[in-house]
Image (spheres, rainbow, N blue to C red):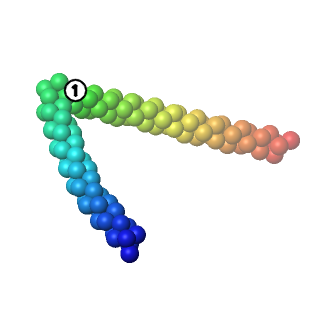
């Protein structure tokens, strides 16, 4: 019987300590979260951070503008090459037709 009472007393103390520890840890965690939130807000509202955000945004716009310009130039160059190839192919085809006409005339006169 004494062992049972001793075990029950130890169990009650353990539960009471666990609840107190749990509440303490919970309070500490909440305080740390509030502290972190305040620090993040302070950094986010900093004029230096705002300026850095603005600078990065402007650099992104500039880079996008340059990429579009480069893409347009590459497209124009590709179209020019395609047109040149098209004209060269038609010129070669006309030359082949004229050569075959000459061959036909030469073979028929012989």
Residue found 60% across the figure and 39% down from its top:
89
What residue is disc 1 on?
52
Q: Nearer the viewer, residue 54 or 107?
A: 54
Residue 37: percent from the left, percent from the top? 18, 41
The quadrant holding residue 59 is top left
Residue 90: percent from the left, percent from the top? 58, 40
Can residue 11 be seen at all in this image of the molecule? no
Residue 31: percent from the left, percent from the top? 18, 44
| For residue 68, side relative to residue 107 (left or right) | left
In the displayed orientation, state which residue is furthest to the front: 2
Up the image or down, 2 lies above or below 104; here it is: below
Residue 94: percent from the left, percent from the top? 62, 40
In the displayed orientation, state which residue is furthest to the bottom: 1
Q: Quadrant of the C terminus?
A: top right
- Say what secondary structure mark 1 lies in: helix
Up the image or down, 21 lies above or below 64; here it is: below
Up the image or down, 15 lies above or below 85; here it is: below
The quadrant holding residue 97 is top right
Q: Nearer the viewer, residue 26 or 10?
A: 10
């Amino acid at each position: 019987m004494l062992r049972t009472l001793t075990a029950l007393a130890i169990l009650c103390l353990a539960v009471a300590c666990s609840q107190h520890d749990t509440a303490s840890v919970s309070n500490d965690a909440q305080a740390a979260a509030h502290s972190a939130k305040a620090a993040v807000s302070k950094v986010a509202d900093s004029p230096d951070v705002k300026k850095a955000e603005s600078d990065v945004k402007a650099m992104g716009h500039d880079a996008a503008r340059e990429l579009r310009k480069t893409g347009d130039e590459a497209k124009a160059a590709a179209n020019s090459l395609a047109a040149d190839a098209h004209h060269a192919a038609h010129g070669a085809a006309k030359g082949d037709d004229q050569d075959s006409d000459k061959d036909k005339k030469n073979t028929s006169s012989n």
